[in-house]
Image (cartoon, rainbow, N blue to C red):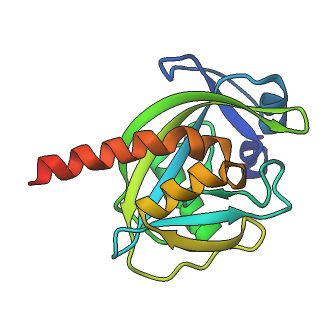
Amino acid sequence: MVTVRDLKDLVVLVDEQDVPIGTRGKMDAHRSGELHRAFSVFVFDAQDRLILQQRALGKYHSGGLWTNTCCSHPRPGEPVAEAAVRRLREEMGIVCQGLEHQFSFIYRAEVGNGLVEHELDHVLFARHGGDVRPDEREAMAWRAVTDEELDHELRTRPDRFTAWLRSCWPLVKERRGAALRHAV
């Protein structure tokens, strides 16, 4: 019998069209660099600032780096949106049902200790005006930044940020800009 604990340690391997082709242990997939499904949640506060988290030092990679509000992998058979709601609550203490899928992209980056992130990443946006209460095992700090502040920090101190945030941020800004243009 497969337990929730077993599923927590599996990622969904996919092809470039996001069609599942199997599963693999999370660490094995990151050692081999196999393409797998992931998601990144960008939550904006009432002042339209992005909520960032600083990954806990105990994370298996990228510990201490700043990143978007929440990032993770859906379990086998778990829809991306449900996984995003679950992990946002678990990592950051944010209860947010209004997640909107914006786009997907593929990236590959070496993240140290022989590990490779090779992900088909689903990017979701949300708004949140309430409390942020990160689990200290997941995030050691959090802060809210404007687009301009993040642009400046990414330009001057890119080493302080995760590989996927550096790859994804230009696409996030483009999507947000297009949404604002259509709303006018």
Query: Would residue 60 appear left or right of 155 to someone viewing this image?
Result: right
In this view, 171 is above or below 105: below
Q: Residue furthest front?
A: 156
Q: Is residue 120 visible?
A: yes
Depth check: give the residue in front, 62 or 134: 62
Q: Residue furthest left?
A: 184
Residue at coordinates 51% horizontally, 20% vertically from top-left?
19
Query: Would residue 74 appear left or right of 55 to someone viewing this image?
Result: left
Rendered-image quadrant of the N terminus: top right
Residue at coordinates 84% horizontally, 50% vertically from top-left?
60
Residue at coordinates 78% horizontally, 68% vertically from top-left?
137
Query: Would residue 15 appear left or right of 8 to someone viewing this image?
Result: left
Depth check: give the residue in front, 169 or 39: 169
Rendered-image quadrant of the C terminus: bottom left
Please state the horizontal and vertical placement of residue 122, each as a whole percent of the image. 48, 39
Q: Is residue 74 visible?
A: no
Picture mark count: 0
Q: Residue furthest right?
A: 113
Quarter of the image where one finds residue 148? bottom left
Please state the horizontal and vertical placement of residue 6, each as a whole percent of the image. 78, 44
Depth check: give the residue in front, 54 or 150: 150
Please state the horizontal and vertical placement of residue 4, each as a whole percent of the image. 72, 51
In this view, 148 is above or below 77: below
